[in-house]
Image: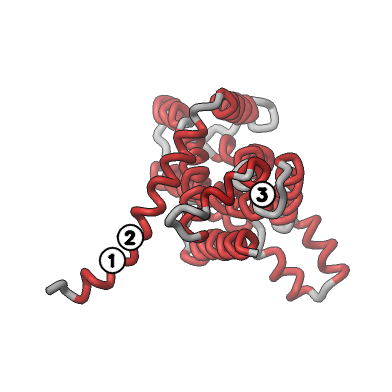
Amino acid sequence: MMRPRAVALLPIHFAMRQITPVFKREFLGYFRSPVAYVVLVAFLVLSVSLAFSRFGGFFKAGTAGLESYFVFFPWLFLFVVPAVGMRLWAEERRSGNVELLFTLPITTLEAVVGKFLAGWAFLTVAVLLSFPMAITVAYLGDPDWGVMISTYLGTILMAGGYLAVCALMSSLTKNQVIAFVLGLIVCAVLLFLGYSGFTEVLQSVFPVALADAFANFSFITHFDAFTKGIVDPRDLMFFVSLIGFTLFLNVVALER
């Protein structure tokens, strides 16, 4: 006789068995195309170039940290993540593979989660490939590893938030270019909400309390705390909730 706990875990185990093949297919699919390597190299070269430029001021900062490196990531993600997420569903719909996918013994939710996790893993690889920067900082000084780890955590969570939004936009169209533009626009709005100039514009249109509430939906607002070494449960909940809600909308869009 099976124990009650084992019975309760059976649905989770079965779902993971269904999600894993989708994840492997999508994740390995990124590296079968030279475009993935171009994206990775371009992302790393551009991020390092910005950090060492006069805008980043890596050496002028005078501190052993990666703040001047990660400060550009919200802007880099604004273009890189839509490029990664635009093909998740738009290409499947254009080629007709989405109908074939759903004839398999897999639910829409499992397909959405599997494809999202594959894209998120690819972006995580791109972020973690920046470890030479951390080694450089450790060589030049005595960095606060707690701050660096929390910054990496916040960056990966932010990448997941960007990707979930872009996956939703990709499920609404068969055209990858349109999916890219839609993802770029929505992510740009969620990015600019955290800047004071944009907030002042909102305050001129809406009540101050409502404008401040809009600002709390910004990527910047919740990412900044991680770059200071603060892992606030509210920031964690924001990214987890954003990912969960947009994936739910993704399922609804595909089923309809």
| Contact flag, marks 2 and 1 (Cβ < 8 Å) | yes
Q: Where is residue 222 in the image (x, y as percent from the top left)?
A: 58, 58
Q: Which residue is drawn at 36% across and 55% down?
A: 16
Q: Does 201 appear above or below 152?
A: below
| Distance in Å between CA atoms under marks 3 and 1 | 32 Å
Q: Quadrant of residue 61?
A: top right
Provide the residue designation for mark 2. 14
Residue 204 falls left or right of residue 50: right
Q: For the residue carrying disc 1, how many other residues have a C-alpha within 10 Å: few (<14), some (14-19), or many (20+)?
A: few
**Pair 2/3: label in front:** 2
Q: For the residue carrying disc 2, how many other residues have a C-alpha within 10 Å: few (<14), some (14-19), or many (20+)?
A: few
Provide the residue designation for mark 1. 10
Between residues 181 and 213, which one lies in front from this camera angle? 181
Kindly tell me whether residue 201 is visible in this rendering. yes
Q: Which of marks 2 and 3 is nearer the N terminus?
A: 2
Q: For the residue carrying disc 3, how many other residues have a C-alpha within 10 Å: few (<14), some (14-19), or many (20+)?
A: many
Kindly tell me whether residue 227 is visible in this rendering. no
Q: Position of residue 238 (x, y in %)?
A: 55, 63
Q: Where is residue 147 in the image (x, y as percent from the top left)?
A: 45, 46
Type of amino acid at the residue the image marks with label 3: Ser
Q: Does 220 appear above or below 53?
A: below
| Distance in Å between CA atoms under marks 2 and 3 | 27 Å
Q: Does 65 appear above or below 113?
A: above
Provide the residue designation for mark 3. 170
Between residues 4 and 132, which one lies in front from this camera angle? 4
Judged from this view, the residue extending furthest toward the right is 204
Type of amino acid at the residue the image marks with label 2: Phe
Q: How many marks?
A: 3
